Image (cartoon, rainbow, N blue to C red):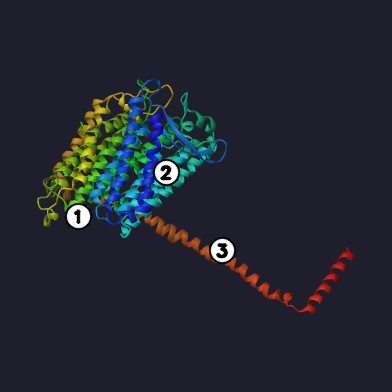
Amino acid sequence: METITNLSPIILALPFLMFLFLGLCGNKLFKSNPNIAGWIGTAGLSVVAIVSYYIAIQYFWVEGKGADAYQQFVLFNHEWLKMTDNLVISIGFMLDPISAMMLVVISTVSLMVHIYSLGYMHGEEGFQRYYAVLSLFTFAMMGLVVATNIFQMYIFWELVGVSSFLLISFYFIKPSAVAAAKKAFIVTRFADMFFLVGILILSYYTNTFDFLKLTAVSDGHATLVNNTMCGEMFMGLSVTSIAMFLIFLGGAGKSAMFPFHIWLPDAMEGPTPASALIHAATMVVAGVFLVARMFPVYFFEAHDVLTIIGYIGAFTSLFAAIIACTQTDIKRVLAFSTISQIAYMFVALAVSGYASEHEQCLGYTASMWHLFTHAMFKACLFLGAGCIIHAVHSNEMNAMGNLRKFMPIAHITFGISCLAIAGIPPFSGFYSKDEILVAAFEHDKVLYACQAFVAGLTAFYMFRLYFRIFWYSENPAHAHHTPHEAPMNMNIPLIVLSVFTCYSFFNLVSNDSSQLFSSKITADRVGFELETNYTIAIASFLVAVVGIAIAWVLYKEKNDKPDMIAGKVKCLYISASHRFYIDEIYLFITRKIIFGGICVAIAWFDRHIIDGFMNLLAWISRELSYDIRDVQSGNLQQYAWGFLVGVLAIAMFAIYY
């Protein structure tokens, strides 16, 4: 572990230094040739990726042997703020299966985005600034996943939010980009308020922020939390459940769960590579990672909250999938797909339970596995969408069609990723999604039915997207110019990510390597074996095939069937295409009720009562000052007379009493 300990600071230090260097000096040093800033940022991230892979390999396949396999290691932990003897905020680096896995995910996707952006962002004003913010984003996410305590996670959590704001508003001269950035920032900040309150409640009772202490398990309990918060009630509710639900709300905001989902589709106003980074491996999975990090507390001490998480996740996945079926902007289809798939991961965490035979948390393992596979194929889909937009200069499906003849690399890689997210074997998405469905089937048949239906919808809307882009029309709206294949610095990341999508399952389905996504829930229970449930696997495969077949019939070639079906369910279709008017409901509540009603009354009270009272005090003071100002007239005789009267009054008062 000594080598890993020595290398680990590079993962945090190098992206931060890249951010400072490119942000402060990039515009001045590389003004004549901005591409140098991109190459420097990419080189720095390449080093981070190499170190991350080395640490993961050492942890899983070198150190991960024997009795100490897959233990949690704190590589360094420096005290930053000391509130009490026990309540200390530290900045450190913790390595365990899920943090090591996240290092690989973040570094891989971020590196691909850095390389891809060399072509996609070429010639953009603010090129150096873009790469500086990419480095800041990577630094923030790395710091979040290796945090040794929940307050360190919260600090980097907020830094991720700031970074996303800067990326979404990169085109700050566009009002829509500025509005989207503000929307994302405000919605996630609102959710983060609950996260902070949950942290404060938890730390008040446990007197620590440290993950190792908070998640320590013994005899079927999260030891510290059980000992300090057991029996504590507030308004008839368990304080533990309240704290953990508030912490989940923070994760729900970051991962765009209903009703905090409204920011994510609008975040597409930022550059497409930034969308890939936000949606695939960084911001949106932070909520899933948070629940996974605190999973022993949820599982043993707040299982009621875990149940709530499951049903919120199931509703969100269905809600987002239905909306995705009606969207025409290809980036927004992928955005709602992300919301649905992240919700899938939350459901998997919620249905975790010890199986009678293997004593394993199947849902937990499946959730982390799906996080890994989803990062690869969703990043490939977003970057592929960027190549398509780069070729046709539009986000709308109506401007596309028949592109397979002009963009073979984008066509093949996009198709592979669509097969993976649809759950078609042997691609990686099939295996991770199948384990989620198995866990749901064993835990809750209602959740299983919902998620199986969502799997069919996913296959449908993804292949609706695929056929509309690469097949469909022989005379598309882009016929006035010839689309072209993207340059190689944009195609190479697509190829790399599609290889991960094709082959990542080969080294993950084995019993040993499945522990990459395991969590040592107790000190003596480690066995996490994954076995394919062929009944559910075949059923999920058939559901996906049906979804793809429907998309084939409706969208492979231009026809009137989609319009006929939309006309028969006109109300549902229009509602879904307008995202069920959730944004309008938020605007009505904020503008009409809060700003136009409540705030008007508060403003009147502030102006007339508060300000009026202050003005009254000022008026009284002014009038009194005019009345008593003659006391300071400067007339000596008046002062002598006043002195005499005062002395006589005091004397009479003294004699009388």
Give the structural element (helix, strand or loop) at label 2. Answer: helix
Residue depth check, mark 1 versus mark 2: number of the one nearer the observer: 2
- Of residue 284 and residue 636, the one placed in the foreground of this image is 636
Determine which residue is flagged by label 3.
Answer: 610
In this rendering, the answer to whether 146 lies above or below 649 is: above
Real-space Cα separation, disc 1 to disc 2, in angstroms: 36 Å
Q: Secondary structure at mark 1?
A: loop
The part of the image, by quadrant, that contains residue 463 is: top left
Toward the viewer: 85 or 344? 85
Give percent across and percent down for residue 157.
41, 44
Q: Quadrant of residue 351?
A: top left
Residue under label 2: 156
Task: Pinpoint residue 551: horizontal percent, then vertical percent.
Answer: 17, 42
To which residue does mark 1 refer?
393
User: Disc 3 on helix, strand or loop?
Assistant: helix
| Residue type beneath disc 2 | Phe
Callout 1 crowding tier (Cα within 10 Å): few <14, some 14–19, many ≥20: some
Image quarter where the C terminus lies is: bottom right
Mark 2 or mark 3, earlier in chain: 2
Contact (Cβ within 8 Å) of mark 3 with mark 1? no
User: Measuring 22% from the left and 36% from the top, which residue is drawn there?
Assistant: 420
Badge nearest the viewer, 2 or 3: 2
Check the picture and name the quadrant holding the N terminus: top left
Q: What residue lies at 40% left-to-right and 59% top-to-bottom?
A: 591
Q: Amino acid at mark 1?
A: His
* Residue 173 or residue 30, whichever sits in front: 30
Q: Residues within 10 Å of mark 2 (few under 14, many from 20)?
A: many
Q: Is residue 319 visible?
A: no
